Image (cartoon, rainbow, N blue to C red):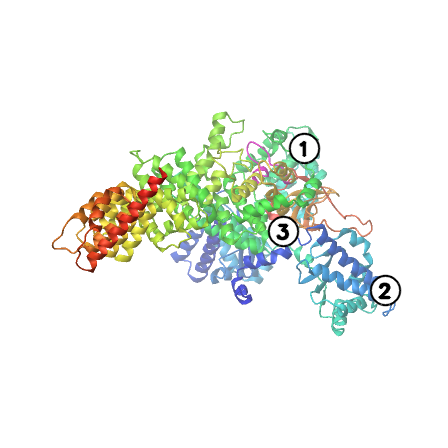
Amino acid sequence: MARPDNIRAEEVVRGLATAANAVRLYPATSPLRDQAVGRFLALAHATVSDGTPLQLIVEPSGFKSGETVLADGQNNVVAFAEALYAHQVGKLIVAPGVTADEVMRFLAAVSADTHAVRDSGGLRAVLKESGVSRLAVVEVTLRASTDEGLSGLDLTAAPLEEIAPRVAAAASAWQESAAQGAGNDGVAGAVAALEEAARDLAMQRIAEALMRLDEATRVKALAAAYATDADGEPMRGMLDVLAKMKPSALARLLSLAANMTGTPTNELLCGLKLPPEALRAVMLLLRPSPQQESARGVPVDADVTAIAREVKAENEVEASELERQIARSPRALAAGKALTTTVQLAMDRKTQDAVQAVGEALAPAVRAGALAEVRAALAFLGTLDRDPALGGAASHARQSVADPELLRLCIGSLSIGADADTVAAILSAAGPVAADTFIAFYIGSNDSLRPRLQQVLRSMGDVVTSAASRRIRDADTPTARELIDVLVGIGDKRTVPVLRQALEHLDVEVRRATLEALARIGGTESERLLVGALGHWDPETRRYAARAIGQARAASAVPAMLKILQGYYLFERNYGLKKELIESLEVLGSPAAVPTLRRMAGRRFVIGRKNRELRYLARRALAGLEQARGNEGRKS
Amino acid sequence: MSDQQESERLESPEELAEVTAGAKRTPFASAKKLGRARELVRALAVAQTNATLYPEAHPLVAQSIDELVSAVGDIMEIGFEAITVNIYKGTLFVEDHVLPEESVTYRKLVEELLARGISALTLDLAFGEKDARAFVELLAASDVSSIAAAQQFLETRDAGAVSVSETSALDEAAEEATPEKKAEARSAYDAGIAAMRDVETQVKLGKVFEIEPLQKLVNSLLSQLFSDPAAVLGLTAIKSHDDYTLNHSINVCILSLSLGAQLGLDKDSLHSLGLSALLYDLGKVRIPEDILNKESPLTADEWAIIKSHATEGADLLKRIQLVDQMPMIVAYEHHQRHDLQGYPEPHGAGEQHLFSKVVALCDAYDAMTTSRPFRREIRPDKALAVLMQGRGKAYDPALTKAFVAMLGIYPMGAVVRVDDGAIGIVYRVNRDDLLRPRVKVLIDAAGRWLDEPHVLDLRLVDSKTGSWARSIDECIPAAEAGIDDVWDYL
């Protein structure tokens, strides 16, 4: 990207090249010439509005500002540079205040025959002759005049080493002449002799040349420049040159001169006409620091050898600790930290924006496995639920974890040791989607993970049962059976209402699984449901219910069972049911069943194999019961 | 992963740099490894002496050739595929590691090599007895006096594992960075200032700033860092009083990226670190400037306001967390310190993130070495001493050492007075000796600014005295030396 000042410089170059073309191509009466020159002037004035002339390096291939090539490859600009270079111009200077008349005369001179210009003393002399002072050129060749001292040098081009001793001499001459009353300011004279545009460059070069002197001479020259003449004036030309020095160099020089002359630096500084920024910079450098280094814990001197030795010394503990941090540094792994930070921010400043940020940080944290941080964040969001201003935002933020993919990751982390309570808390906060995701995950999981999943399941029973409730009645058989399996995993009475719905499933296998589940879950609620199932509309379901009662050892079901056994059903041949009931009664071992069983066992005349089987089962059950009672009697 | 897959995967310069970093970065970091470099030079010198004193068939010649082959084999075990012995201005280096004592002790070897126009000698993995014999014969051959003749000599003896050249790698390293590269780096820096100024303006106006220009800036700095680290690191010498905040954030970004690259962070992490380093102090936009720039001591209330910039910054940066969360974390944590005794007060167990530690170090260093209205800048060596003092407390111990190792005790851009009274700027840091950088001498002992500054490698040994030719006397603040715009000289 080009720097802004270079962009402006490029515009100026283009403007001047265009003006040169216009002057060359159109007759003097054409308004296009004036327009092009006017455009250039506007650009030039805008660019040098701060008072500093624009300096451009001229090369046969184009213009440069510093190291940057301007308007690279633009034919009219290159042609203009070529034309200037043909006049041996190495530098073009555009000063503030340049006029249209000067531009016209400048362009006329540039477009003139090079031999003729050279015979007239070169382009610079021609321009000077024609009164162009705010567009100046520095020629590549050095030509000195026959004048003595600084005036004999081309200050815009002479080597700095040549300028330096003459500046020092000029300062000495000033000091001597000023002491006699009328100071002779050689620097001011030499600079004034130059065209206006070149003066700035000349002063800059004199300032640079001063730096080529040894420091003692430089300081002496500066001190000499402050000597005043009869009018009380110092060597103004030299002081103007000093104002062109860079702040640090000037500050150092002023300090040294102050030490040498005993004049305070402020006084020396007052004599200089520095631009405000430069003045501020020099003043900052000259004044003592408000804070001392010692007050900031900075050592008086740095023991560099000790530091180098320390840096080279190997410390395995420190190095391995750093390695650990590097391994943990990828941003994906920092998501937990980011979440904690957003929570911290939201705690400090409870705003919708802050709560939203917490929501945004949740998903990356889940992906990074930072579940403890996620749980804490969700808990924080939970505290905002009742806040009228933030409750909605908190709920919305929480929803960002209600993404099946994230939830699967969360549940899957159980296989790598994630805390089940934490996973459950996250799933519970995520709502119904979490339950569905969990159910799907549970169904697809293998036996090794089931115990861990069941830990979660028990913690989030309500959410899962509610999800199962929504699905179970209409689910296909395999799904319904899996759902029942999940409910068994919860294993408490919260699941019973859902299982009640499952008993109404169209597939008998589902109903059977439900009854088995009820038997495994146990408890009063389950027993009540099992008893109720003895009256199910489907005979097979009733039979399964009877079996399940035995499996559940549901003693409370005995009266209902006996009632069925004692009953006579004209339109239903319920041998199967009775068989299951007798077998379950045998398992239950209830004494209340003895009379009924005895009656069945004592039937002498039975017709049919199935009735005989019932009598046989009753006898077996009775024998079992009596044996159990005998055993109990012996024990007592 | 197959070799082919591996080679296909390693395409970007930074990946390649990472792979080769192991051997290239301080290869002789441990005493044992450095011992192998010394042994190699000793073996070369002994072989050269024996070949000069005894006939070819003498057992001592054969023995010294065996020792040379063995010494080359030992050094290759460090991880080299080829090892170069350089002679730079009369001083011996193995790769870019100076061997001051050997430069004097084995002066004869140096002279014999130079007499044949040899400034660099490279021995590769296949180096064997045939190569060693050919090389020893070359050093004994009085009729070989040019590099071309030396190359021809080795070629005719089929010594393919030895190559000699007239210029050492150190000659090339001493060359100035091309103006184009400097301009490119500066352009990225200026673009960075402009981008940060936009961010600052947007934030002050309460608007959401665009992250893309900053990402582009980090990309640009990173790609230049991998192609010319010195050019980029040198940019941190740019200091500004007026645009302190903007310059400071770019400088911290460059320092952080350099340190991150030194630590071997992957590209993605470096991007994230760079972005964090640009934005970590964004919260200061919300702090009144009169407090930020206050010259007198701060009151407790003012101090509390200053401290809130960490939280304020994180608060602003939480908005970009969908792009990258690290800037928010780093903004929040960068003053928490390694020992967590800083601010904001940490909640619960945990530690400062590595990126926060990196940025904290770079922030402290750049802030200390930049002049502010309320205090003068601290010399770089003293600033590093302060950081080293803070190891284990404010700063991570190993990270601080890595930072100093990266910058050097006299970092690039540090102004130093050499023991002959001349003043110069540290131009490049020599990794093998942090106390002996290459210095660009600007001002002679009499205070004259030189027309053509020259680069002085402080690792060079005076062959007559056997001691260092020049050393640093002291580090001085640039302003005190009268030097502005240090970057211009790098």
Residue labelled with disc 2? B60
Looking at the image, which is closer to me, B368 or B449? Answer: B368
Q: Amino acid at mark 1?
A: Val
Q: Quadrant of residue A636?
A: top left
Residue A568 drawn above or below residue A255: below
Disc 3 is attached to a residue of which chain? A
Report how far apart the C-alphas of labels 3 and 2 lie in the structure. 66 Å
Q: Is residue B382 visible?
A: yes
Looking at the image, which is closer to me, A120 or B341? Answer: B341
Image spot of residue A29 (x, y percent) = 40, 58
The magenta stretch spans which residues? Answer: B366-380
Q: Residues within 10 Å of mark 3 (few under 14, many from 20)?
A: many
**Outermost residue toward the left in this view:** A570
As for residue A318 lying within the magenta part, the answer is no
Residue labelled with disc 1? A300
Q: Amino acid at mark 2?
A: Leu
Report how far apart the C-alphas of labels 1 and 3 lie in the structure. 46 Å
Q: Secondary structure at mark 3?
A: loop
Residue labelled with disc 3? A157
Asked if marks 3 and 2 fall on the same chain, the answer is no
Looking at the image, which is closer to me, B299 or B401? Answer: B401
Q: Residues within 10 Å of mark 1 (few under 14, many from 20)?
A: few
Q: Secondary structure at mark 2?
A: helix
Q: Residues within 10 Å of mark 2 (few under 14, many from 20)?
A: some
Disc 1 is attached to a residue of which chain? A
Q: Quadrant of residue A219?
A: top right
Q: Is residue A56 visible?
A: no
Asked if marks 1 and 2 fall on the same chain, the answer is no
First reached walking from the N terminus: tag 1 or tag 3: 3
Left or right? Give the position of B168 relative to B325. right
